[in-house]
Amino acid sequence: MDIASLIGIIVGLGCLITVAYETSHGHWMMFYSLEGVLTVIGGSISVVFMSMPMEKVKGVTKYLKRFMFNRGPKATAIVTMLTELAEKARRDGILALESDCANAQKVEPFLATGLRMAIDGSGPAVTETTLRLELAAMQERHKAGKKFFDLIKLYGPGWGLVGTLVGQIGMFGNLSGGDIGTLGKSLAVAVCATMYGTVLANAIAGPIGDKLALRSSEEMVNREMILQAILSIQAGDNPRVTADKMIVFLPGIERAKLKVAA
């Protein structure tokens, strides 16, 4: 599980619940409006269905899993593994890496694909072209996840405004009656709808979309690093050269860890 995401959820919920309790003194129904829920939540869902094809909408569970769980290998682990493979290829020949493909498939399928192409004798140009096509396809898949939450972030507050306007119209339409209870209910619908839209956009959809974008960026960097390492192994470079080509993709802290481990 991604600890940072969990901490963010706990801190956000804790602050929101504390403030709500202090304001309502435990009267939680004060913050509930069925009309607001139907307008904001239902409206946001309708926007997603109108804007995205069905197969992309069905992937929402995968997007949430990617937000909460980061199962990809760490960059330092990839550098260590590929350096060992480079040393093995240099010592025993590239065909000796065939036994490592099964393990590479478990760690990173992209790495396994590149290794198989190198072992099968594909030229560097063919290997690079194929792997870059895979990178482009992956990037397009990741865009769908971010797009899902960007739509909610964009239109959630708009539907909150719609709920606010509906509540205000109801309030103004009942001014002549003088029923304070009816006026209060209409005003509550207006305020709750605004609150729901704001929370949905700024506390849920926005952070999830940004985390997915960061995950995608990290994976692109890792796979570009793998691509350069495979091309280096194919070229018969010294393992130290292969490692140096990968290390340039790492931030300073990660580079320091590798040096300490070495």
Image (tube, rainbow, N blue to C red):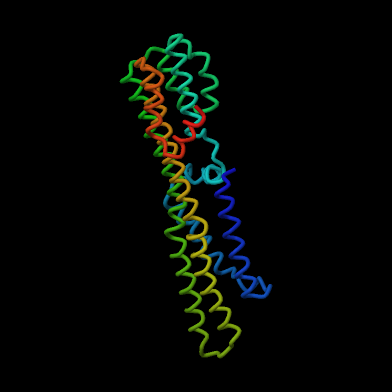
Q: Residue at x 58, y 47 (%)?
A: 3
> Total label count?
0
Toward the viewer: 15 or 183? 15
Q: Position of residue 25 (x, y in %)?
A: 67, 75
Image quarter of the N terminus:
top right
Q: Quadrant of residue 136?
A: top left
Toward the viewer: 122 or 95? 95
Viewed as shown, does residue 127 lie left or right of 262? left
Q: Is residue 247 above or below residue 231?
A: below
Of all residues shown, which one is farthest toward the right?
Answer: 26
Toward the viewer: 233 or 99? 233
Q: Is residue 117 above or below residue 182?
A: above
Toward the viewer: 122 or 72? 72
Q: Position of residue 65 (x, y in %)?
A: 56, 43
Viewed as shown, does residue 31 lie left or right of 221? right
Q: Residue at x 43, y 54 (%)?
A: 151
Q: Position of residue 181 (x, y in %)?
A: 61, 84
Of all residues shown, which one is farthest toward the left?
Answer: 125
Q: Position of residue 177 (x, y in %)?
A: 55, 90
Q: Residue at x 58, y 53 (%)?
A: 7
